[in-house]
Image (tube, rainbow, N blue to C red):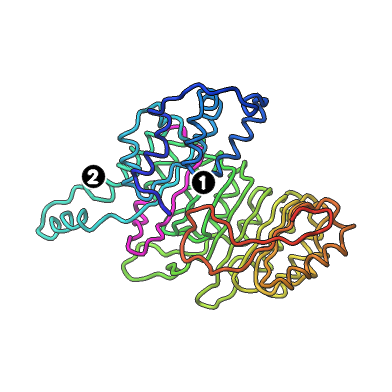
Amino acid sequence: MPLSSKSVVLSYRVFDFCHFTDSHSARFLALPLEVLQKIYLLILEFDINDHNNLMCVNRQIHHEAEKSFFQRPLRCRSQDDLFEFVARRPAKLLNNITNLRVTLVGISGTVMKPYLASIVVGASAVTGQHPYVVEINRIGNALAGLPNLTQLSILKSSDPSRTLPSSIVVNGVLEQAAEKFKRIQILRIDLEGCRLDLLGAFPNLRSLYLTGFSETSPLKMADVVSKLMYLEELHILGPPLGSQTRQKHGYQSSIVQSVTHHLFERVTPLKCLSVREVADPRGKGSNFLNTKTMKALYDRHRDSLTALHMSATDTPSQPFLASLSAFLTAARRLEEVSLRWPEMKVSFIDCLPTTVTRLEVRVSSYREAQAVVDRLSAKSHRLPWLRRVTFSVPSEPPHGPVESNQQPLTFGLPVNKRTV
C-alpha cells in the first residue's frame, strides 16, 4: 500500500530525534563487522517499523547500520509527497538518501482550470506559467534536494481515481533526472507516455526496468540501449493493460512497442533478463516471447546470462518453446531459471544446463509439482548444483504496476539433497 507523506517522514525520523541508551553487551554485537553488515542488509527486507526499532537499540548498531539503512527506498505516492518531504527535512538527511520511488500523477483540475480560463478570455499565455512547466520545475527542484540518488523509480498510480501524468511532464522529469543524476545505476519507468531515447543520458545504468512500450520506435530504442555499456540487468513487463497503441486525433504522439528483438540483438550481453508478459487484450499473440526474441538471446546472450526469468498469462507457442529449449541447452553460465505460464511441460527439465542452482516453475496442482520433483530426482546426475526449487501458484494478472515487493504464493515439496 502506498505511504502517505506523513508515513514517509516517519520512515526516516529515527535519524532526527531518537535518543539512544547504552545496552548490555550481547553476542550479536560481538560478531565481526563484516558479518554484521551483511545482517544489516538482510534487515532491509523487514518492515520499516522493525528496522527503526533495531536502529534504536544502541549507538553502536545505529552507527554501523546507518549506511545500509539509507538503501531503503523513499516511497512517495505522488509528487506532492516528494515536495513535502524535501521541504521539511534537513540537507544532511537528504544527502544520505540513495533510493527514490515516486508515483507521478496528473495535475489536478483545480490547477488547470484557471490557466485554461485565462486563455479562453484572451489573456496572453506565458510559457513559464503553464501548469506543465511549473510542475516540471517543482519536481526538478525536489530532485535536486536528493543529490546522491543512485536508484530511481518513476511509477504509475494503481489508483483508478487518479489521472495519468501528461507525457510532457514525464519527459520533462526524465530530462531533469538525466541532468542531475549521472550516477544513476538502477532506473525503473512504469509509464508508457514518455520518450525512452532519454535513457542515453544515464551512462552508468546497470539495471533497467521498463514496460516495453513508449513513444520511442523499436529501432531508436535499440540504438539507445546499445550505448549503455554497463547494463547488466533488463526487466520487461508488457503489454500494459489499456495502453494506447494507435494514433488518435488530438494526440501529439502514439505509444508503440519499443522493446523488440532488435533491442536484444544490439544490447550489451546481459547477466540477468526478466520478461513478464500479460495477455494481449487484442488477441495478437505474444509481444515479447516469440522466436525472434529467442534467436537474439541465443546469438548474443547465451554465454553471458546467469539468470533468466520468463512468465506469461498465456501458454507460449510451440515454436517459441522449441527455441527456448535450444537456448537452455546451449547456455553455459545459467544459474537461476524461472519459467511460469499455464500448462508447463516437465520435459523442459531435460534441457536445463548443469550449472543451474535455483529453479522456479509454475504449477496448478500438487500432482504437477510432484511430477516435477520426480523428473528432477531422475535427472539429479545432470543437475549436481541444484539447491533450491520453488513452485509458483498462478494468481490473477496485475492490472497496473506492482509497487510493492510482494511475491506470489509459493509452497515447497521435499527433494533429496536439495532445499525446496
Image quadrant for the N terminus? bottom left
Callout 1: helix, strand or loop?
A: strand
Residue 356 x, y percent position in the rendering: 78, 53
Q: Give the range drawn in magenta.
A: 147-170
Mark 2 or 1, closer to the camera: 1
Residue under pointer 1: 187
In reply to whether residue 153 is colored magenta, the answer given is: yes
Residue under pointer 2: 128
- Please, which residue is most extreme toward the bottom here? 283
Residue 339 x, y percent position in the rendering: 68, 63
Please say if 157 is above or below 133: below
Residue 218 x, y percent position in the rendering: 54, 60
The answer to whether residue 227 shows anywhere in this view is yes
* Amino acid residing under circle 2: Gly
Image quadrant for the C terminus? bottom right
Q: Bin the neighbour count of mark 2 within 10 Å (Cα to Cα): few under 14, some 14-19, many 20 and up.
A: few
At x 73%, y 72%, the residue is 368
Residue 149 x, y percent position in the rendering: 47, 36
At x 50%, y 31%, the residue is 55
Is 304 in front, or is 76? 76
At x 50%, y 60%, the residue is 217
Please say if 292 is above or below 343: above
Q: Bin the neighbour count of mark 1 within 10 Å (Cα to Cα): few under 14, some 14-19, many 20 and up.
A: many
